[in-house]
Amino acid sequence: MEFLREGFRRALALLLSGDAEVFGIALLTLKIAVVATVIACGVGLPLGYLLATRRFWGRRAALTAVNTALAFPTVVVGLLLFGLLSRRGPLGGLGWLYTWQAIVVGDVLLALPIAAALSAAAVQGVDPRVRRTAQTLGAGRWLTAWTVAREARFALAAVITAAFGQVVAEIGAAMMLGGNIRGSTRTLTTAVALYTAQGDFGLAVALGLVLIAIALVVNVTLQVLQGRGGG
Amino acid sequence: MVELRGVRHRYDGRLVLDLEQFAVPAGAMLAVVGHNGAGKSTLLRLLALLEAPTEGSVLWDGAPVPRRAPTALRRRVTLVEQRPVLLRGTVLENIGFGLRVRGIGRADAYKRTAEVAEQLGLLSLLERRRTELSDGEVQRVAVARALAVRPDVLLLDEPTSSADRAAAGAMYRALSHERAERKARPLTICIASHQLEDAYRWADDIRALADGRLSPVTPENLFRVDLAPAGTDTMSARVGAIDILVTTDRAGPAVLAVPPGDIFVSREPLSSSARNVLKGRVTRVAAHRGGGVAVTADVGVELIAIVTAEACRELALAPDAPVVFSFKASAVRVF
């Protein structure tokens, strides 16, 4: 138990002293998570809306595919993208392997099914009369979607939180596509794994605490945003 | 104005509407009556261009409407659902929703909102949210919201189902006011109702819907029943608190119509061949659009009989007067 206590003590000291490495890793993690969440939700939420509201051939299959992708192992996504982005792969020319952009691509692929499947469920949960009401009062496609989204705002905020949570906490794709390069692609999760393996328990705990703090701040922020305005 | 042609509409393979032709002429005040589940709400959704029929076409001013109706066309017709929902925000924002989406300026939108809110007695509720309103108030807000955008066609699904008498009166006054104000471009109204009183009071054209089809008989006294054997050549149907005897060889689920002109109205039971003799009290006496007087009585269920004005006077038929309705088992239509 002593090493655990020591770990927390060290973590506190690192955080309070504003350790450059800890903050560098935290900032990179935040950057990757925000960019990946914005892209995944930017595509996933409209996709979810379409899946929930449009009747088209293959809709059921599309829903099944998206729901199956929810359980995609992160290392498999990492492996797949590794093949695509490696020098010999079809996207090798981009030179993205072992860069933060590669991690973003992996994270987007992991968060997209979450954003699409959960937002489809959220929109399906909205009373169908809301959509009809917006339409019959003359709203076009976008305004109708916006009206429905306003009704599902709590569920959609939870979707964004879940997507962000997936992105910020995953390690498989970040490790395989980023390579855990110090000062360049080391994220909180890969760093925690590395420092734990190296026996630097204090640094690992400090980074773990930062990870939890980020998750907490994002959740609280979304809750505050949800709280504004009543029914 | 708007017309359905050769329309067959299905939900999950089940046929819910089957109409060879259904036209709503410009400026009409049309009522569609029928029991619950007759297809009235589906019909209104098709007329509102919110759904495309599974088969057949919808025509607007004679031109076919594409399966995805253009927004500009959809803006000419507004539907108020049977149990309307208010959108997030205040009553003011709800009534102004349609005006905002049409890009109408804040000042003009507010003026129009206040105007319809006043007509429907909603001025004191403008800052309330949906959770602070009764069902009847929600319904009035929904009607105000639909009227605010000045549609060419207004579709109302059971508009007074949650309203009390005074609120229903306000609603119909607002509709009349709107129609009177718009002489150049008359407002077409189509009301779906299972309350015949609504229909007879306001409509100048009444059509009956039964099991998704237009019913060939007069729409009064229409009931969905289960026919059970009652004698050698008669069937019995439970309607409300009474049993109606019918001459038919059919059994099981059916729709019954008692033609109002075939009902004998008397103060005392008659000695006659009529197998159905029902005692009750008059609830309403009103001029019938097709001539004569429509006498509505509660005889265990609400029935309407048409009598001449003279007969009405002689029998002193007035609300609350005791009355006997008699009709032959063979007069009852089954379909």
Image: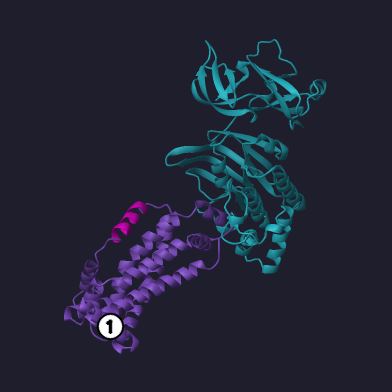
In percent of the image, x 49 and y 62: which residue is there? A149
Q: Quadrant of residue A162?
A: bottom left
Q: Which chain is purple?
A: A
State the image coordinates of residue B36 (x, y, percent, origin top left).
Answer: 56, 36
Residue A142 in view of the camera: yes
Instruction: Identify the secondary structure beneath mark 1.
Output: helix
Left or right: B324, with B245 as reference point = right
Q: Which residue is mark 1?
A: A9
Question: Mark 1 belongs to which amino acid?
Answer: Arg
In percent of the image, x 60 and y 50: which residue is there? B79
Q: Colour of chain B?
A: cyan
A68 in magenta = yes
Say if A121 sits above or below B162 in the image.
below
Left or right: B26, with A215 as reference point = right
State the image coordinates of residue B195 (x, y, percent, origin top left).
Answer: 64, 36
State the image coordinates of residue B144 (x, y, percent, origin top left).
Answer: 67, 54
Q: Quadrant of residue B262?
A: top right
Q: Quadrant of residue A69?
A: bottom left
Q: Residue furthest left?
A: A198
Residue A187 in view of the camera: no
The N terminus of chain A sits in image quarter: bottom left
State the image coordinates of residue A106 (x, y, percent, origin top left).
Answer: 28, 72
Say if A33 sits above or below B159 in the image.
below
Specify the subunit that label 1 lies on.
Answer: A
Segment colored magenta: A59-69
